[in-house]
Structure formats: C-alpha cells, structure tokens
C-alpha cells in the first residue's frame, strides 16, 4: 500500500513540476541567458580594458624613449595624446610627463600645469604631492619662501610620500630668503627622519654647514 502512495505522490510532484515549467520556463530560460550574457559581457569588458592598458603602456614607453632621445616636441605631443585618451592610471602619469616636457621650454607654464594636477580631486594624493613638488622645483629660483611654504607644507608632513624632497626644497628656499630659523627647522626634520635617502641627507648636512653660528643650537 505504501508503494502505491509513493507512486501517486511521485505522479503528483511530476505534474506540479510540469505545470511550473510550463508556466515559468520562459522566465527561467531568459534568466539563464541573461546570466550567460552578463558573464560574457564582463569578460569582454575585461579583455578590452586589458587591451587598452597594454596599448597605453606601449605608447607611454615610446613617449619616454622620445624624451630620453631629447625629442621633446615629439614626446610632449605623445604624452598629451595619452593624457587625453589613455585609461585613468596612464592618463595621470601622462599629464605629469607633459608638464615635465613643457618645463624644457616654459617653466612657468609647466608649473601651472603641475598646479592644475595638484588641485584635481580626481588625482590620487601621492600624485598631487608629486605635482606640488615638481611645481616648487620649477619656481624655487623665482618664488618667495612663504609662497613655497604654502605650496609644500602639506607635502612635507610626516608620512607624506615626497616629504624628503619637499623638506629639502623648503630648506633651500628658506636659506635663499636668509630665514635661517626656518632653514634649520627643515634641515632638522631631514636629519631626524630615519627614512631620509642617504644622498639627500648628505646634501642637507652640507647646507647645514653653511648656516651661520648664531643659527646653530
């Protein structure tokens, strides 16, 4: 008797499944096709993005070669093209390199380009600090110490990626402005930072030796 009930239950389940399939099969098939299409689309997107990145990388390397060959006009144009069309990572690097190429012919214009990068909130903090430092390097001979301090103080803070170069520039600017107290402040920060590169530390020690005795503690 139990076997009979089992057979009846099996027939009932089969009928229910058939009804569900007849009623919802189009949705099930459509859902499966949508999943397949989504996965395929994502794979296609990943492939295209990887291809774009590879092409941008090759173009960037070519532009670097032009710059190293002192073909600065061609390099500037190549970097400018990448800055306009490349994926985001290469686009920021290309903007920095365009400004560096412009610096060979117009330091003031290049400094303005670096300033624009530093002010761009879509750019990462390390790249913004690098742009600030590069602009300050171009303006060191013509800008006042207060101006450079305003530009670089944040970049010179503990933990900042380019703090070592920023501190050196501020020490040089303060020394040129005959502000020995400020120069001593930045040189001390260079000396007390265990991560200061050896070459920069040596330059800081040489500058410190030029400080007048009254400025020494």
Image (cartoon, grey):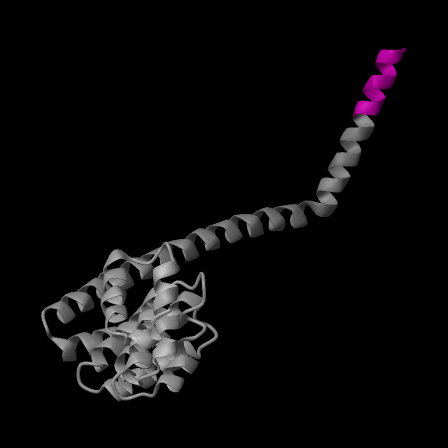
Judge whether residue 3 is colored magenta: yes
Q: Which percent across, then down, holds residue 40?
A: 47, 51
Nearer-the-camera pick, 59 or 3: 59
Q: Residue at x 18, y 74 (%)?
A: 75
Q: Which percent across, then down, holds residue 144?
A: 34, 88
Q: Residue at x 61, y 51 (%)?
A: 30
- Which residue lies most toward the front here? 214
Is residue 84 visible to the viewer in this orientation of the structure? no
Stretch of the chain drawn in magenta: 1-10
* 170 left or right, relative to 74: right
Nearer-the-camera pick, 153 or 179: 179
Q: Quadrant of residue 138?
A: bottom left
Number of marks present in the image shown: 0
Magenta-colored segment: predominant secondary structure: helix
Q: Residue at x 43, y 64 (%)?
A: 160
- Above or below — where is 173 with respect to 15? below
Q: Which percent across, then down, holds residue 57?
A: 27, 61
Nearer-the-camera pick, 8 or 150: 150
- Above or below — where is 209 with respect to 25? below
- Which residue lies most toward the left here? 69
Q: Quadrant of residue 206?
A: bottom left
Is residue 69 visible to the viewer in this orientation of the structure? yes
Give the quarter of the figure containing the C terminus: bottom left
- Above or below — where is 171 with respect to 21? below
* 14 left or right, relative to 34: right
Q: Which percent across, then down, holds residue 178?
A: 31, 84
Judge whether residue 118 is colored magenta: no
């Amino acid at each position: 008797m139990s076997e009979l009930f089992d057979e009846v239950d099996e027939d009932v389940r089969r009928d229910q499944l058939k009804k569900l399939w007849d009623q919802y099969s189009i949705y099930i098939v459509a859902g499966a096709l949508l999943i397949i299409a989504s996965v395929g689309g994502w794979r296609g997107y990943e492939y295209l993005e990887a291809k774009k990145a590879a092409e941008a990388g090759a173009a960037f390397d070519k532009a670097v070669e032009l710059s190293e060959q002192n073909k600065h006009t061609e390099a500037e144009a190549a970097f400018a093209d990448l800055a306009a069309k490349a994926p985001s990572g290469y686009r920021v690097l290309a903007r920095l390199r365009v400004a560096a190429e412009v610096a060979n012919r117009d330091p003031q214009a290049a400094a303005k380009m670096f300033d624009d990068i530093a002010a761009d909130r879509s750019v990462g903090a390390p790249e913004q600090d690098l742009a600030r430092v590069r602009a300050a390097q171009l303006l060191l001979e013509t800008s006042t110490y207060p101006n450079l301090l305003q530009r670089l103080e944040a970049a010179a803070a503990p933990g900042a990626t380019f703090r070592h170069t920023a501190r050196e520039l501020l020490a040089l600017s303060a020394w040129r402005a005959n502000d020995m107290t400020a120069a001593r402040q930045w040189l001390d920060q260079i000396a007390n930072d265990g991560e200061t590169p050896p070459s920069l530390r040596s330059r800081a020690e040489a500058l410190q030796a030029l400080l007048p005795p009254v400025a020494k503690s």
